[in-house]
Amino acid sequence: MRLLLVRHGQSTNNVLAEELPYEEYIASRSAEPDLTPAGCEQAELLAHFFGGIQSAPAESWQHSHVTERPVTALYTSPMLRALKTTAPLARALGLNPEVWLDIHEHGGLFTGSPRTGTVVNYGGLTRAAMAAQFPGYAVPDAVSDQGWWFGGYEEMEQCTARAQRVARTVRQWAE
């Protein structure tokens, strides 16, 4: 097994974080930011790159510094920016991505400030919204008409436990 990790394209929160001091950023960030035009372009470039490798003759894979074999599965975070980054790649590779609830950034979906305790939870995309916006994606049963994130602000201990679950699963796949 060869595991390739891809971060989402640039999001509106990424731009805010670069431009604003922390307190201003945290007060104005979105719980579920969209991709910027640059982020959409990054997603398309990713798809073009991997689509080119995928369609190349098998003997040329050994000369690629990125992958030795075709991509056979796609897993994506349920966060909108990740789902949107995955869409062009899925089309280019002819794969149906699987939404994996445990792979997302620390903190979860929220507005407000964890430092001041003014956090407001956001449930994320609902099952219906995912199905409408991302047809063909395998959406887990845990995604409901209320969304997928119900954890409030995720503390680092919770994030570490979640990351360890992901690592255990990936190691099992490799066995």
Image (tube, rainbow, N blue to C red):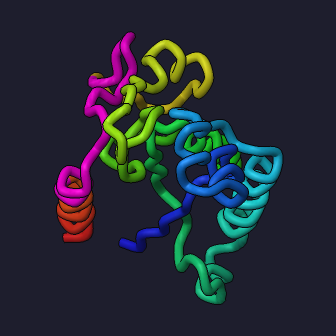
The reply to whether residue 91 is in sight is: no
Q: Tell me where residue 136 sits by quadrant.
A: top right
Q: Residue at x 19, y 70 (%)?
A: 175
Magenta stretch, main secondary structure class: loop
Question: Relative to 164, is 39 above or below?
Answer: above
Is residue 148 rendered magenta in the image?
Answer: yes
Q: Residue at x 71, y 63 (%)?
A: 55
Q: Position of residue 112 (x, y in %)?
A: 45, 34
Residue nearer the viewer, 150 or 167: 150
Q: In this rendering, would 63 be left or right of 22? A: right
Q: Residue at x 59, y 79 (%)?
A: 66
Question: Relative to 124, is 15 above or below?
Answer: below
Is residue 143 rendered magenta in the image?
Answer: yes
Q: Tell me where residue 63 sits by quadrant.
A: bottom right
Q: In this rendering, would 42 be left or right of 76? A: right
Residue nearer the viewer, 94 or 139: 139
Q: Position of residue 161 (x, y in %)?
A: 17, 56
Q: Residue at x 64, y 82 (%)?
A: 59
Instruction: State the extent of the magenta-drawn residues as a range.
Output: 142-161
Question: Relative to 21, is 2 above or below?
Answer: below
The reply to whether residue 5 is in sight is: yes
Quarter containing the N terminus: bottom left
Question: Relative to 14, is 112 above or below?
Answer: above
Residue nearer the viewer, 106 or 134: 106
Q: Position of residue 74 (x, y in %)?
A: 48, 51
Residue nearer the viewer, 19 or 73: 19
